Image (cartoon, helix red, strand yellow):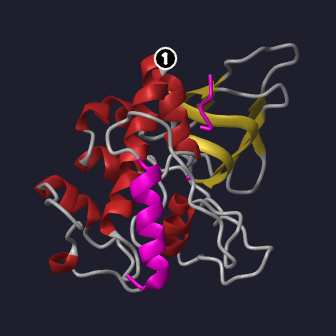
Amino acid sequence: MRTPLRRSAASLVLAAALAAGCSSGGGSGRTEAAPTASAPSLSAAERVAGEQDGTAPTGGPTASAPARPTASGAPDGPVHGPSAPAGPVRPDAALTPATGTFTPQEKKYLSGRVPVAADPAAVLDIGRETCQRLSRTARHDKDAAAAAVVAGDVRDAADAVAHLCPDQRPVLDAARGGYPDGTHASPAAGRYRSVSAGPDCTWQITDARGTQLAAGPAPGATAPHTLTVPAGAAGLQSTGCYAWLRA
């Protein structure tokens, strides 16, 4: 199963909306920010995400949510989106909530990732939401949660788990070394299994000259599929298979 699985005047509006709509622990639902003339289709959390990525809308009725970064395979670690905003960030000394205090681990999560115009508490809520998504999905299907991390459908999973929900470390361990759909150079040798593959899932492994070494699935095969990357393979191409985990 897949859980699909993202203090200027403007930031004050954002903070107020998040205070009303974002839970910090996994309780009731989330209320989107009231529409504004500059970004009528974005929720408050999406605006913060846009500021983090440097893709915040500049205005007009056609403004849309920032595109999710494309993940790529990483043989020695889990895949996840960029941790740091594209623009200037708040110094650590300025990472203070409107009321109360942040824990040491929350401060570590926020360090280097809060845009100067954003509320640190709003950015922290995004990390907490990541933890909640991982927890909810893993409770039903740990492979689906790991595949969502590999596919890039869960924002900043590695950083959120490291600092906010270390109990979800097994999900990252399962995601480590996986590959999402796409083209990957020098794939790590080994055996992989598909998770949440669609009916049109296809894959192939090539050598340095582009010669096909293996391809699949076999005619009539049904998901989940498996593939073996031989030593020295130069490329892995996957389409419609969603994500591959180490078998």
Name above or below for residue 179 compared with residue 83.
above
Of residue 86 and residue 234, the one placed in the foreground of this image is 86
Return the residue nearer the eye: 138 or 236.
138
Which picture quadrant has residue 12? bottom left
Foreground pick, 233 / 157? 157
The image quarter in which residue 227 lies: top right
Q: Residue at x 38, y 86 (%)?
A: 88
Identify which residue is drawn at 70% across, 68% down: 40
Q: Is residue 62 left or right of residue 117?
A: right
Q: Quadrant of residue 129?
A: top left
Of the residues shown, which amino acid type is indicated by label 1?
His
Q: Is residue 201 left or right of residue 243?
A: right
Q: Residue at x 66, y 84 (%)?
A: 58
* Residue 164 pos. (x, y %): 26, 46
**Left-right relation of 222 to 117:** right
Tell me the quadrant of the picture where the N terminus can be found: top right
Callout 1 crowding tier (Cα within 10 Å): few <14, some 14–19, many ≥20: few
Question: Position of 10 compared to 111: left or right?
Answer: right
The residue pinned by badge 1 equals 140
Please indicate, yes or no, whether residue 76 appears anywhere in the rendered image: no
Residue 221 in view in this figure: yes
x then y, percent, for residue 36? 65, 72
Residue 17 belongs to the span the image colors magenta: yes
Q: Secondary structure at mark 1?
A: helix
Q: Position of residue 158 (x, y in %)?
A: 36, 49
Q: Residue at point 57% right, 54% down?
A: 32
Query: Where residue 61 sits in the image (x, y, percent)?
Result: 79, 75
When the figure is inspected, residue 238 is found, relative to residue 64, above or below; the finding is above
Q: Which residues are magenta?
A: 1-22
